Image: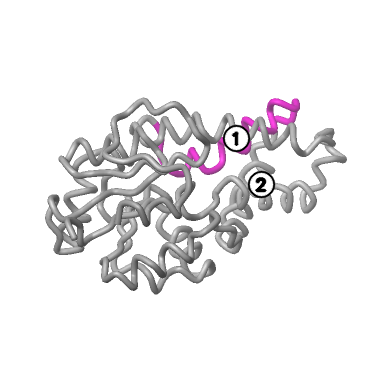
């Protein structure tokens, strides 16, 4: 068995961030009566939020903005698209978003089955995530997947972000693993796959959406069950 340590990404790889986020935003749409404020089409609001969230996360991972700005400004800019310039409302929604989101438990199909399979084969599994530490641990606990992972490495604990080498070095040290016996499994080419390349680690690109690959991963799969063909 060439690998002993499997480093998984969490969001968009095994925890279905899009579905969980959409459910959370629907809860906020109802709680804050956004339809009465002129946002009667929730799907349109969610589409706007997704664009702003993606752009701001990209800026955050590149070090251009701080965590707090990301948290509230993605809501603020989404509301602003509907001519609602309300920072107080944005900040209140941001707090509730992070309270509600980790209670959502949608996982990608076959997540539990593949984790059971890998655990039974004796792999040591860990998580490396750029997500907010307190939120990520709640997601893991509430989704009942905590028992599968030995180490959970966050950007806050490591003081680094994927794809920088430092977070991977920190992860290897915590897991007491070497590069040669480790593999990174994630959906984000810029963070997970490029990060693995930066440190010389093998990788699996979990291509749930059948995107055209732009970064050369060691392996590419479109469904988690395909990990059985690799590991």
Toward which corner of the image does residue 136 lie, by quadrant?
bottom left
Q: Residues within 10 Å of mark 1 (few under 14, many from 20)?
A: some
Horizontally, is 84 left or right of 172 in the view? right
- Left or right: residue 97 versus residue 163 is right
Task: Examine the rendered structure and indicate whether residue 147 appears above or below residue 115.
Answer: below
Q: Residue at x 24, y 39 (%)?
A: 164
Q: Are marks 2 and 1 in contact (CB under 8 Å)?
A: no
Which residue is painted at 29% across and 69% down in the image? 121
The quadrant in which residue 91 appears is top right
Q: Residue lying farthest right? A: 36
**Of residues 56 and 76, which is closer to you in this image?**
56
Residue extent of the magenta highlight: 65-85
Give left or right: position of 230 versus 27.
left
Q: Position of residue 51 (x, y in %)?
A: 58, 29
- Looking at the rendered structure, the secondary structure element under dot 1 is helix
Residue 50 disc label: 1
Q: Label the magenta part by its dominant secondary structure.
A: helix
**Where residue 119 appears, x then y in whole percent?**
34, 70
Q: Mark 2 vs mark 1: which is more N-terminal?
A: 2
Question: What is the CA distance from the residue labelled 2 to the residue labelled 1?
Answer: 9 Å
| Residue that badge 2 annotates | 22
**Within-10-Å neighbours for mark 2: few <14, some 14–19, many 20+:** some
Horizontal relation, residue 186 to residue 22: left or right: left
Does the segment drawn in magenta span residue 80?
Answer: yes
Splitting the image into 4 quarters, where does residue 65 fall? top left
């Amino acid at each position: 068995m060439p690998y002993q340590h499997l480093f998984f990404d969490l969001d968009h790889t095994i925890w279905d961030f899009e579905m969980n986020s959409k459910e959370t935003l629907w809860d906020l749409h109802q709680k804050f009566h956004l339809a009465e404020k002129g946002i009667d089409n929730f799907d349109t609001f969610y589409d706007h939020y997704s664009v702003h969230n993606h752009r701001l996360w990209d800026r955050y991972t590149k070090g251009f903005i701080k965590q707090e700005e990301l948290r509230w400004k993605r809501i603020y800019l989404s509301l602003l698209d509907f001519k609602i310039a309300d920072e107080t409302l944005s900040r209140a929604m941001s707090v509730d978003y992070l309270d509600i989101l980790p209670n959502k438990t949608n996982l990608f199909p076959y997540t539990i089955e593949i984790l059971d399979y890998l655990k039974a084969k004796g792999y040591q599994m860990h998580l490396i995530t750029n997500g907010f530490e307190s939120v990520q641990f709640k997601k893991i606990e509430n989704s009942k997947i905590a028992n599968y992972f030995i180490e959970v490495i966050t950007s806050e604990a490591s003081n680094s972000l994927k794809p920088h080498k430092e977070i991977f070095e920190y992860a290897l040290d915590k897991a007491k693993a070497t590069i040669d016996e480790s593999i990174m499994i994630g959906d984000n080419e810029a963070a997970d796959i490029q990060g693995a390349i930066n440190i010389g680690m093998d990788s699996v690109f979990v291509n749930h959406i059948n995107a055209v690959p732009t970064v050369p991963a060691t392996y590419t799969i479109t469904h988690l069950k395909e990990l059985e063909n690799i590991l």
